[in-house]
Amino acid sequence: MRDKGSPGGRRRDKQDKPGSSFHIGAILGSSFNSLGIASKLKEHSIRKVWAECVGKKISQKAAPSRLIGTTLYCSVTSSPWMAELGFHKQSIIEKINKRLGYTAISEVVFKLGAVEPPKEAQAETIKKRELTAEERLAIEKAASGIKDEGLKNLIKKVMEKAKE
């Protein structure tokens, strides 16, 4: 059956019918691959598990910088650390792949470069400022008109965070 309203007079598939459903995962999956987003998502996943896989000390000295295919390029703070990590390369590959549940990387290349400390380490260095009594009173006063207790507490927390 040809559909005169469709481009080129092609047959209408079941999914072409109005109201039919598409599998969004299939659409996104093919789009991610064609746009190169799949590689960036894999790279992001590796960055997220890096500190857990290599440990806190190494994550302060080395960090993933780029993923090309299945080769992970990592920046390392010094030559001695680069040499040390060379001995642990296979173990790092295995831990990352095991943690992700698939073979994300097959090779790691270490290069000298800048390494940002892990976000947890950055958070430790930022000291929270204690709110003054006046600030706490102003927050209480601002939230006092809210009847919903859950919403009131949420608003107070947001206001406290904004003042820190």
Image: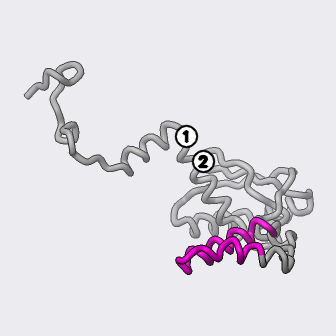
Mark 2 falls on what kind of element? helix
Asked whether the residues under the numbered discs 1 and 2 touch, taking CB atoms below 8 Å apart as contact, a structural biologist would say yes
Q: Main secondary structure of the magenta part?
A: helix
Q: Is residue 101 left or right of residue 162?
A: left
Horizontal arrangement in the rendering, residue 51 relative to residue 19 (left or right): right
Left or right of residue 145, residue 121 in this image: right
Residue beneath disc 1: 36
What span is colored magenta in the figure? 138-164
- Residue 54 visible from this viewpoint: no
Residue marked by disc 2: 40
Tell me the CA gap for discs 1 and 2: 7 Å
Q: Residue furthest top?
A: 8
The local secondary structure at tag 1 comes to loop
| Label 1 crowd bin: few (<14), some (14–19), many (20+), radius 10 Å | few
| Location of residue 12 in the rendering, given as x and y in whole percent from the top left corner | 17, 32
Q: Amino acid at mark 2?
A: Lys
Res 107 label:
none
Residue 147 seen in this snapshot? yes
Where is residue 120 drawn, in percent x and y? 76, 70
Give the residue drawn at x 20%, y 39%. Answer: 18
Amino acid marked by disc 1? Gly
Q: Kindly identify the residue that appears in the image at 43 percent across and 47 percent down.
A: 29
The residue positioned 58% from the left and 64% from the top of the image is 97
Decide if residue 79 is on the left or right side of residue 14: right
Decide: is 7 above or below 119: above
Q: Is residue 151 magenta?
A: yes
Dividing the image into 4 quarters, which one contains the C terminus?
A: bottom right
Q: Which quadrant of the view contains residue 126?
A: bottom right
The picture places residue 99, in percent across and down from the top left corner, at 58, 69
Where does residue 2 sit, x and y in percent of width and height?
11, 25
Q: Nearer the viewer, residue 144 or 102?
A: 144
